[in-house]
Image (cartoon, rainbow, N blue to C red):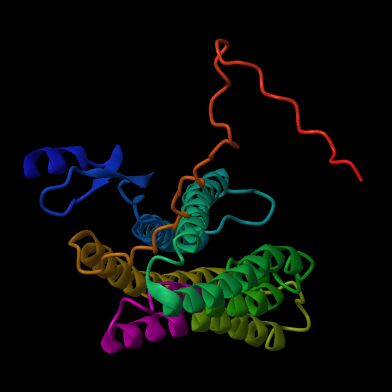
Amino acid sequence: MPALTSALRLPGIVGYATPPPGYAPYPLPYPMFPPPPAKTPQGIGNIRWSLVLGAAMQAVNIAGYIWTAVLLSQFPPPGSPDFGLIFTTLAFECAAGIIGFVAVLLFLLGVYYANDGREEYGPIHVREMEHALIFFIIALVMGLIGPVGGLGFSASPLTSVPGFNPVGGAFGVVRGLFVGLCLLTLVKTFIPKEDRTVAWIGTAILTAAPAIGAGISVFLYLTRNPADPLGDPASLPFAFLAAAGLAATELVGYGAFLWIYSKVLRRMRSGEFPPIPRPPMMYAPYYPGPAYYPWYPAYPASPEAPPPAPPPGQPPP
């Protein structure tokens, strides 16, 4: 009997409750199914891959800025465009753009899965996910407005260098701040105090890099030669080298968050952070209705029985 009971309680079939000694097993009023897979580790994994691609994008930017600075140091005379410089710059920009686009898609997918599993780790995690979603929306809006807001600002050729636009840099500061806050809040429940310090450092780096770029662009604009308002092309190589340095700074920030997310994902997959199971849905037990008893007589009269006698007449007055 115990073997039969355990065999009948396999996942995916109607479960049978363990009966008292001497009684047969009786079925439960609802089937027993295995719990669905956790969504939070899947979201953390997608965000980790987006951080990998973000670091790769910054590495491509560093190489592109340095190579452009080297080519600009051998800038040809005016009127003879350098097609090698143009094609090389476009190649680096296209590669960085494609990698960044895929990274954004993975980040969106990771935030979706993490928000879908917001109730897997208790009410504190639910509250942190609400904050992370707000930070994500603000960062997304700033990331969409920033490039558009900086299109009309072209005081000198230096402002066309990526990362050296005051208007775009102002939006980039807000975007970097809220991207860091979103990345920190998504895993805040699972990291110790020392890892939170590393996350705060990464947030500060992502915020400071656009601010430094905007400050350099403002300084170059204020110190330009009034006789040559378009700027000095000889300073463009140094501007691209500074842009490479800012890209390397952001690479360090992405690396800090990548280390944190890899650590959290490894601990989740090892079972150190099991999801809190939701309480099962309770169904009202089924009780049979009251027994139906027909009115007397319970059975029809026999055909052989004599007909019933008429009622007695009324007594005389």
User: x, y (%) of residue 301?
Assistant: 58, 20
Towards the viewer: 24 or 220? 24
Quarter of the figure with the N terminus: top left
Asked whether residue 63 appears in the rendered view, the answer is no
Towards the viewer: 129 or 98? 129
Towards the viewer: 191 or 209? 191
Towards the viewer: 175 or 64? 175
User: x, y (%) of residue 23?
Assistant: 16, 47
Residue at x 59% of width, y 83% of height: 216
Relative to 6, 100 lies left or right:
right
- Residue 201 counted in the magenta span: yes
Residue at x 53% of width, y 40% of height: 292
Q: Residue furthest top?
A: 304
Q: Measured along the vertical axis of the image, is residue 91 above or below residue 248? A: above
Residue at x 43% of width, y 72% of height: 186
User: x, y (%) of residue 14?
Assistant: 31, 39
Give the residues in magenta.
180-206
Asked whether residue 273 appears in the rendered view, the answer is yes
Q: Measured along the vertical axis of the image, is residue 81 above or below residue 121? A: above
Labels in figure, total: 0
Secondary structure of the magenta portion, mostly? helix
Residue 220: image quadrant is bottom right
- Residue 298 counted in the magenta span: no
